[in-house]
Amino acid sequence: MLEIKFEKQNRTLKAEPGENLRELAIKNKLSVYPHVLKIFNCRGRGLCSSCTVEILSGKVAPRNDIEQEKLAKKKNPNLRLACQLTVEDNLVVRTHV
Ligand code: FES
């Protein structure tokens, strides 16, 4: 069992390896979306970038093709799309970046 800490919310969620980060947050009533994007988002299809989070610590797989495209202009290499990320390590995550 992994521990995923959401820094801004000061909450730590238990996760199974391979769980999707966005779905984990939703399942635990924690939003990865800022403001009105809670309503207006692409529902995890990798189209809107509104689920962008920063991985503050922990190992993650390299960005997939969707993330490479959507986050290409972001200089911070630790930014990821929660909807495209599966958890494989204990993480500390910052939402609403
Ligand atoms: S929910 Fe739209 S890109 Fe992740």
Image (cartoon, helix red, strand yellow):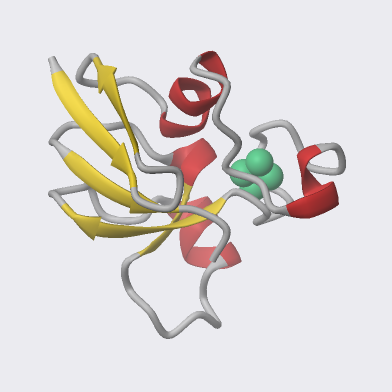
Q: Which residue is drawn at 57% across and 58% down?
A: 96
Determine which quarter of the picture holds residue 77: bottom left
Q: Can you name the residue that lies furthest to the front here?
A: 10
Q: Quadrant of the N terminus?
A: top left
Can the viewer see residue 67 in this picture? yes
Please determine whether, in this image, residue 30 is positioned above or below residue 58. Answer: above
* Residue shown at the point (36%, 55%) measured from the top left: 63
Which quadrant of the figure shows ligand 1?
top right
Q: In this view, does 73 lie above or below 10?
A: below
Residue 15 percent coordinates (x, y):
26, 18
Question: Residue 21: percent from the left, percent from the top?
Answer: 41, 32
Q: In which quarter of the image is residue 70?
A: bottom right
- Residue 80 sits above or below residue 5 on the image: below
Location of the C terminus (image quadrant)? bottom right
Instruction: Look at 32% across and 67% down and name the residue there.
Output: 78
Instruction: Provide residue 20's location: percent of width, then percent of height.
Output: 41, 26
Q: Taking 44 as reference, is 1 left or right?
A: left
Residue 46 visible in this rendered orientation of the protein: no
Which of the pair 90/7 is nearer the observer?
A: 7
Left or right side of 12 for 9: right
Task: Look at 72% across and 49% down and name the residue there.
Answer: 47
**Viewer-proximal residue among 94 and 73:** 94
Image check: 95 left or right of 45?
left
Labels in figure, total: 0
Place of residue 10 in the rendered image (x, y in percent of width and height, measured from the top left): 36, 42
The one of 58 and 77 positioned closer to us in this rendering? 58
